[in-house]
Amino acid sequence: MTPTRINCIIIEDELPASIVLEMHISKFDFLDLKGKFMSTNTALNVLKTQKIDLLFLDINLPGKSGIEFAKSLPKDIGIIFTTANPQYAVEGFELEAIDYLLKPISFERFSKAIDKYCKIQKTNQKIDQLEQTETERHFVFVKCERKMLKLYLDEIVYFESQGNYLLIHTEKDCFKTHQSITEMIEKLPEGLFCRIHRSFLITLKKVTKFNSRSVTIKNKILPIGRLYSTETITLLQSFVKN
């Protein structure tokens, strides 16, 4: 599905880097470049007068740095940091930036950052749709001990695969059913759950802490599998922004 139009600006004081970013942006029909600026101060007017969705922000800028400027921006503006200094990556991650691009920026790396932004936006839209249309508590029926049990989704904390069985951890109990995580995923609405490991499927809203290696739910630390790492972090970051 083609993304809706995305309004973006560049704040970059190095002309060669600014030109490269503009060239990359021009190759995406849905990216609408609303301006290029040499400093954060010169960009303020367009941010106040137009709806800007995405910001390509250099960190080393005259006056206020990109890091300082990002802290003052509304949460709904996506930020992709650009810089020649890799030591800023951790701080950029803590600011919940979409991505962090090291100069010189290749088109392949730029494309991955745009793809990541689009996935986050798609997840946010699904969350909004669910919240707008939700008129009653969602539930799922599972077969436990030869009986069909009705479980409300807002009470489920996470699912844990154990051989041919699936443990369903809720706020108060744990239920055992004879099915796989894949089978369970097919029954669940999109946007509320995330598979973080071949053995774990979590409820996103129940996460209290996370990093690139694990998530914490109800003081239980669950590992993030290597194959699921990118999608997991992307979904969790989108929930943090909301």
Image (cartoon, helix red, strand yellow):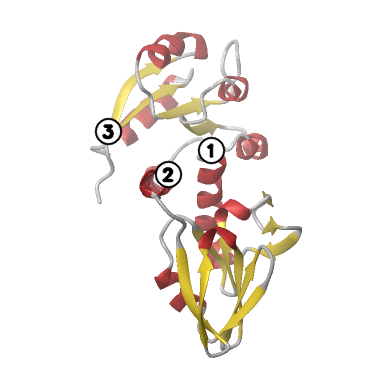
Q: In this view, does 32 lie above or below 205?
A: above
Q: Residues within 10 Å of mark 2 (few under 14, many from 20)?
A: some
Q: Horizontal placement of 4 versus 55: left or right?
A: left
- Closer to the camera, 98 or 12? 98
The three-letter amino acid code for the residue at tag 3 is Ser
Secondary structure, mark 1, is helix
Which mark's residue is nearer the viewer, 2 or 3? Answer: 2
Disc assigned to residue 241: 1
Whether residue 70 is situated above or below residue 176 in the rendered picture:
above
Task: Say which mark, if any, is on residue 92.
Answer: none
Q: Farthest residue to the right: give it.
A: 219
Looking at marks 1 and 2 on the same chain, the residue that comes earlier in the sequence is marked by: 2
- The residue at 32%/21% (across/down) is 34
Give the residue at mark 3.
Answer: 26
Q: Nearer the observer, disc 3 or disc 1?
A: 1
Circle 1: residue type: Lys
Quarter of the rendering containing residue 37: top left
Pinpoint residue 88: horizontal percent, then vertical percent: 65, 34
Q: Are marks 1 and 2 in contact (CB under 8 Å)?
A: yes
Left or right: residue 237 compared with residue 124: right
Q: How many marks?
A: 3
- The location of residue 120, given as percent across then percent down, is 44, 46
Q: Badge 3, how many Cα within 10 Å: few under 14, some, many 20+?
A: few
Q: What is the spatial separation of the Cα atoms under label 3 and label 1, in whole angstroms?
A: 27 Å
Q: How far apart are marks 2 and 3 (CA)?
A: 25 Å
Q: Nearer the viewer, residue 20 or 32?
A: 32
- Name the residue carrying label 2: 124
Q: Percent x, y for residue 123?
A: 42, 49
Q: Which residue is drawn at 61% across and 66% down?
A: 158
